[in-house]
């Protein structure tokens, strides 16, 4: 199987760490899937999904294909829950890849102990995205976000809804999303990654809603949804222009403290727009 485009394998001016921090779209692909169409919008990160992306009967085949893909370009892997048989096998593959591993998305991360297990097996430079997919994990989100191995949190909406009985209504999911945003901010890591953005026609709206509650990226299941998701998470040109004008009109030390939050938001928006331009 030819390699899929990956975060480490795409030509980009952004260093790997900056790409992980600012990536908007995380495209989940089965190692068994065919090539992404050449004219498809390019996701910021492509992740070979060893968990939900493989039926139980084809796990070994999928790992073998992921190994072959890594021979051509570094790969990101979504690995199964820590401490399970599949999780151990996925983690063994990730460790064996060495510098051919771009990073891992840890499915069903339940506590910092799961990250300790990953930490013992993988090089310290490997970024880890911890997926929050259960009520137990949500209650531990602050500790998971604060773990030294956590680069970002991701919201596994499907499994979370199954565990809690919540609907897909944005109002119903507002509280858990807010918990992940606050946990990420308190830990000093990038804003969280939302669950799959849904149908292509809904991608931009879903991304814009997620951005409004502090998320900075989304999982994507269909490459055709990448453009819409990018638009939802990218500051509009008019917003950037307005932020630059505010900063230009407010030299440091020239305004009272009540304007500090607005100036901080403006600086953050301009910095994010500049970082995204390099992805």
Image (cartoon, rainbow, N blue to C red):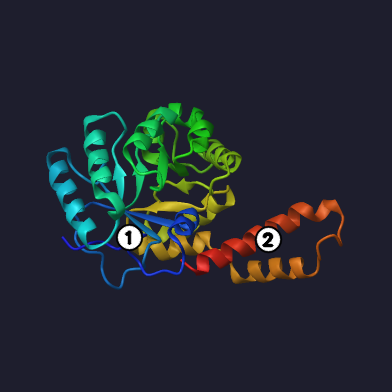
Residue at 74% from the left image edge and 70% from the top image edge: 245
Residue at 26% from the left image edge and 64% from the top image edge: 36
Residue at 75% from the left image edge and 66% from the top image edge: 247
Element on which disc 2 rests: helix
Query: Residue 74: which quarter of the image?
Result: bottom left
Would you say residue 213 is visible in this rendering? yes
Element on which disc 1 rests: loop
| Mark 2 nearby-residue class (10 Å; few <14, some 14–19, many ≥20) | some
Quadrant assignment for the N terminus: bottom left
- Residue 123 in picture, x, y percent from top left: 35, 44
- Residue 211 in picture, x, y percent from top left: 55, 53
Tell me if label 1 and label 2 are in contact, CB under 8 Å.
Answer: no
Q: Is residue 199 left or right of residue 249?
A: left
Viewer-closest of 48 and 252: 252
The residue that label 1 is drawn on is 6
- Residue 150 in picture, x, y percent from top left: 46, 41
Q: Earlier in the sequence, mark 1 or mark 2?
A: 1
Q: As displayed, is residue 210 above or below residue 4? A: above
The residue that label 2 is drawn on is 267
Q: As displayed, is residue 165 above or below residue 123? A: above
Question: Marks 1/2: CA distance?
Answer: 30 Å
């Amino acid at each position: 199987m030819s390699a899929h485009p990956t975060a480490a394998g795409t030509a980009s001016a952004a260093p790997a760490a900056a790409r992980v921090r600012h990536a908007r779209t995380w495209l989940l692909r089965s190692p068994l899937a065919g090539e992404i169409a050449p004219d498809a919008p390019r996701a910021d990160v492509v992740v070979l999904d060893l968990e939900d992306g493989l039926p139980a009967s084809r796990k070994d085949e999928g790992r073998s294909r992921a190994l072959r893909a890594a021979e051509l370009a570094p790969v990101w892997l979504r690995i199964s829950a820590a401490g399970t048989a599949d999780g151990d096998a996925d983690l063994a593959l990730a460790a064996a890849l060495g510098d051919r591993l771009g990073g891992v998305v840890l499915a069903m991360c339940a506590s910092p102990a799961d990250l300790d297990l990953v930490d013992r097996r993988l090089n310290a430079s490997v970024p880890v995205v911890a997926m929050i997919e259960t009520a137990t994990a949500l209650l531990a989100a602050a500790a998971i976000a604060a773990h030294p191995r956590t680069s970002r949190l991701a919201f596994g909406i499907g499994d979370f809804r199954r565990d809690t009985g919540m609907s897909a209504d944005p109002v119903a999911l507002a509280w858990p999303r807010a918990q992940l945003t606050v946990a990420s901010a308190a830990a000093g890591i990038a804003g969280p990654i939302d669950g799959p953005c849904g149908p292509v026609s809904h991608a931009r709206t879903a991304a814009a809603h997620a951005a409004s509650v502090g998320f900075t990226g989304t999982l994507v299941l269909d490459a055709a949804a990448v453009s819409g998701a990018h638009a939802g998470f990218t500051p509009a040109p008019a917003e950037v222009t307005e932020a630059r004008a505010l900063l230009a009109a407010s030299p440091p030390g020239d305004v009272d403290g009540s304007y500090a939050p607005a100036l901080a938001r403006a600086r953050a928006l301009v910095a994010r727009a500049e970082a995204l331009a390099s992805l």
